Image (spheres, rainbow, N blue to C red):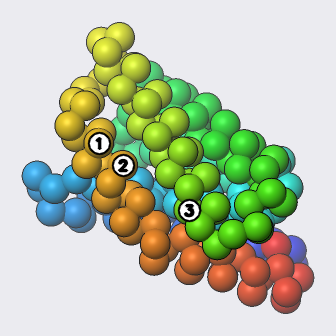
Amino acid sequence: MIRVLGPLVRAVLLLAAALLPSAWPAGLARPDLVLLVVAGVALLHPPRVGLLVGLAGGWLVDVVPPGAAPLGASALAYAAVGLGLGAVRRQLVLSPVLPWLATAAAAALVLGARGVSAAAGVGRALPGELAWTLGVTMLVAVVVLPLVMGLERWMTRRGWA
């Protein structure tokens, strides 16, 4: 039963991260909170955990309105981010800035995939909006990433994750 609590807490975090941007004021760049949850989990766990959390988060981004097109593209991008950050997590402990920089690179990857699909005629993403989203995401990451990582460490110490 206890081992179920970690994935349940992650699911709640991902759901909140997918739904919260819809409450963001219109006209302002929205941070990619799902990416921050995926990054926070992937930076502390093996690559397969990051992959699964990224896949689940990407599916939520794909299906929660306004959704993303094509269906599954976000899931693949977030899964790649989770897998990549999980694979390099041991090298990122050398400096407290490295996890933030790795998250910035991951955010650029996800937003780049969104921009490429928009350029292909699927969905809508303007380069200026993508740049603002990257900036706001990294600004919010200064607070959210340590909180998610602290929660993950706490759950790991208790044997939940």
For the point 22% across and 63% down, the residue is 24
Asked whether the residues under the numbered discs 1 and 2 touch, taking CB atoms below 8 Å apart as contact, a structural biologist would say yes
Q: Position of residue 99 (x, y in %)?
A: 63, 62
| Residue 50 visible in the displayed image | no
- Type of amino acid under label 2: Leu
Relative depth, front residue between 37 and 104 = 104
Q: Are marks 3 and 1 in contact (CB under 8 Å)?
A: no
Q: Find residue 116 and report its horizontal and vertical position in percent.
A: 40, 20
- x%, y% of residue 88? 78, 50
Q: Nearer the viewer, residue 61 or 103?
A: 103
Residue at x-position 72% and y-position 43%: 84
C-alpha separation, residue under disc 1 versus residue under disc 2: 5 Å
Q: For mark 1, does the 10 Å Cα neighbourhood hold few (<14), some (14 to 19), or many (20 or more) residues?
A: some
Residue found farthest to the front = 95
Secondary element at tag 1: helix
What amino acid type is highlighted by mark number 3?
A: Trp
| Precedes in sequence: disc 3 or disc 1 | 3
Q: Quadrant of the C terminus?
A: bottom right
Q: Which mark is residue 46?
A: none
Mark 1 — residue?
131
Q: Is residue 82 above or below residue 14?
A: above
* Percent of width and height locating residue 122: 33, 17
Task: Kindly identify which residue carries mark 2.
Answer: 134
> Residue at point 25% right, 48% down?
132
Quarter-of-image position of residue 1 = bottom right
Cα–Cα gap, marks 2 and 3: 13 Å
The residue tagged 3 is 100
